[in-house]
Image: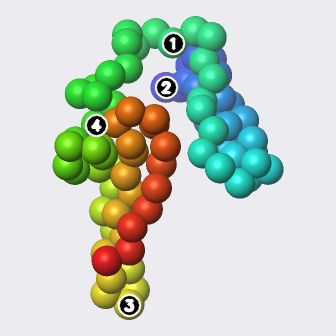
Amino acid sequence: METFYDGYIVNALIDASYKAAESKKWEPVELKNWRSGPVNQENAGLRDYDDQYFLIKEEKMPDGKLKVILKDKQTGKISQVIQ
């Protein structure tokens, strides 16, 4: 059964989504009360792509191309490459 805290997390995600839609860029999810401990590379699900990037997602496109979404390890900038 969902709790009030679950709703708080969902609303924070929705707020960040609206902000991203308006700014046309990735926006952070702002949580004042995070109960699940520190977020780091391991528990955020980030895998090394190469020396410069973490792999966020790979997606096969309808035309057969591969879209790769990456996060720069130093700047945190998100980018995508279509191969």
At label 3, the amino acid type is: Asp
**Where in the figure is residue 69, as x and y percent of width and height?**
39, 57
Which residue lies under the disc numbered 1?
34
Three-letter residue code for mark 2: Met
Residue position marked by numbered label 4 in the rendering: 45
Pointer 3: what residue?
63
* C-alpha distance separating marks 4 and 1: 17 Å
Give the camera-side residue of 10 and 62: 62
Q: Residue at x 38, y 42 (%)?
A: 72
Q: Residues within 10 Å of mark 3 (few under 14, many from 20)?
A: few
Closer to the N terminus: mark 4 or mark 2?
2
Residue annotated with mark 2: 1
Q: Residue at x 62, y 11 (%)?
A: 32
Instruction: Give, as a three-letter code, the residue at label 4.
Output: Gly
Helix, strand or loop under label 4: loop
- 31 displayed left or right of 50: right
Colouring scheme applied when the structure was drawn: rainbow
